[in-house]
Image: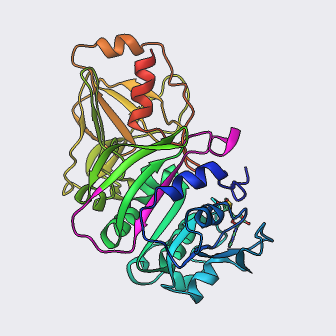
Amino acid sequence: MDYSKFYTPQKTAKTLIYELSIPEPQKVIDICCGSCNLLFAAKKKWNNVNLYGVDISESQSTNEVIYERKDGRQFAIEHPHEFPLVLANPPFDFIKIKKQFPKLFVNEFKDITTSRLEIEMLIANLSLLSQNGVLLIILPSSFVEAETYKKIRQIIANNYYVESIIKLNETTFGASRINCYALIIHNTLKTQYHTKIGCISEDLISYTSNINSETLKKGYWTCDNTTFVTNSLNIKRGNISSACFTSNGQPILHTAKTTNCNWSPQIKYISKDIVPTVFAESGDIIVSRIGKSAGQWCLYKGEKIAISDCLYRIKDLDTSLIKKMEGKKFDRNLKGVATRYITITDFNCWINSL
Ligand SMILES: C[S@@+](CC[C@H](N)C(=O)[O-])C[C@H]1O[C@@H](n2cnc3c(N)ncnc32)[C@H](O)[C@@H]1O
């Protein structure tokens, strides 16, 4: 699928722009402007704002937009800290070589390497922000939820103020069902704050919870990233990433690629110095969170053992859950653009539907 041409629908653009409670900016830019829908929505809200659009292809800009045909990342390198408001729904795609525009990877981003275009665009967009400027950006849900992007989430939470994380409706981009979030990020250093977590429904944004800046700075940007407890379900994600694996040491359960009906996790090893926090015991249910086997599950019957962050562990103390799940397969759509995955909420919703 070509993820580079999913223009932001006018209604969604308007809803998101009206969510920005900032003084009228003098100028606003979108460096992947395409349809210019985000820019036009800004013009509707603030009559006097000057619109700047950049796109690598011919854009649908009108004479309302000061338009330049260029790679948006190059434009960002040439115009650092110039814009009080930056709008973005960048293309979601792989890049041919990592760090295509090395000049973007400076200061807090110097240690980031990525093979994703939207991540380079995110960094480019942040570099355009003037002091106290605001970025509204649409990114794939993997950016907010997946382990792969934890490091860059930590960097952003430590160097910017993340005001809101808003889940877009799955149908925002039509039948393609791309899972995305809109993020509102300020180029302002705030030591302690709460980030609003919400979603768009019927073109209205409703906030359902908050995440404190301490949690955000650790890279956890969703409420369900590590633990989810209801009266009946206690599900927790492992805390050991595959980067810690060694050839021997203490054993740990990790996801396995098999997708047949007898899925079970595989054994890996980590150094004896690492302290895992989540263990599986006999009678627990183990769920694969990510990759080809995302959503596969099994009943664990071995010795107490740590689990990797590719797995969820569910405590089933009175065996009522396993009775409900027996013979059933997780059959919901997987999330993610390149790597497929499920969240705790996805699994919880599936169980509740049984
Ligand atoms: C997903 S569309 C979004 C367009 C617009 N921002 C919107 O919200 O409707 C992405 C746009 O980025 C443009 N694009 C792709 N690669 C680019 C690059 N390297 N630099 C600038 N624009 C690029 C595409 O031509 C396309 O118009």
Q: Magenta segment: does it hold 189? A: yes
Residue 112 placed where, x, y %? 45, 73
Instruction: Please indicate, yes or no, whether residue 146 appears anywhere in the rendered image.
Output: no
As drawn, which residue projects farthest toward the right? 58
Is residue 266 positioned above or below 166 on the image?
Answer: above
Instruction: Please indicate, yes or no, whether residue 98 appears anywhere in the rendered image.
Output: yes
Residue 36 placed where, x, y %? 69, 65
282 sits to left or right of 247:
left
How has the structure been colored for display?
Answer: rainbow
Q: Nearer the viewer, residue 313 or 351?
A: 351
The quarter of the rendering in which ligand 1 is drawn is bottom right
Residue 284 location, quadrant = top left
Q: Residue at x 55, y 31 (%)?
A: 259
Q: Residue at x 68, y 68 (%)?
A: 33
Residue 318 location, quadrant = top left
Residue 245 location, quadrant = bottom left
Q: Magenta segment: does it hold 176? A: yes
As drawn, which residue projects farthest toward the bottom? 78
Q: Residue at x 52, y 22 (%)?
A: 261
Q: Residue at x 41, y 45 (%)?
A: 198
Residue range (magenta)? 169-194
Q: How many marks?
A: 0
Residue 223 placed where, x, y %? 33, 44
Quarter of the image with the C terminus in it: top left
Residue 16 placed where, x, y %? 52, 55
Is residue 293 positioned above or below 81 on the image?
Answer: above
As drawn, which residue projects farthest toward the front? 47
Q: Nearer the viewer, residue 291 or 127?
A: 127
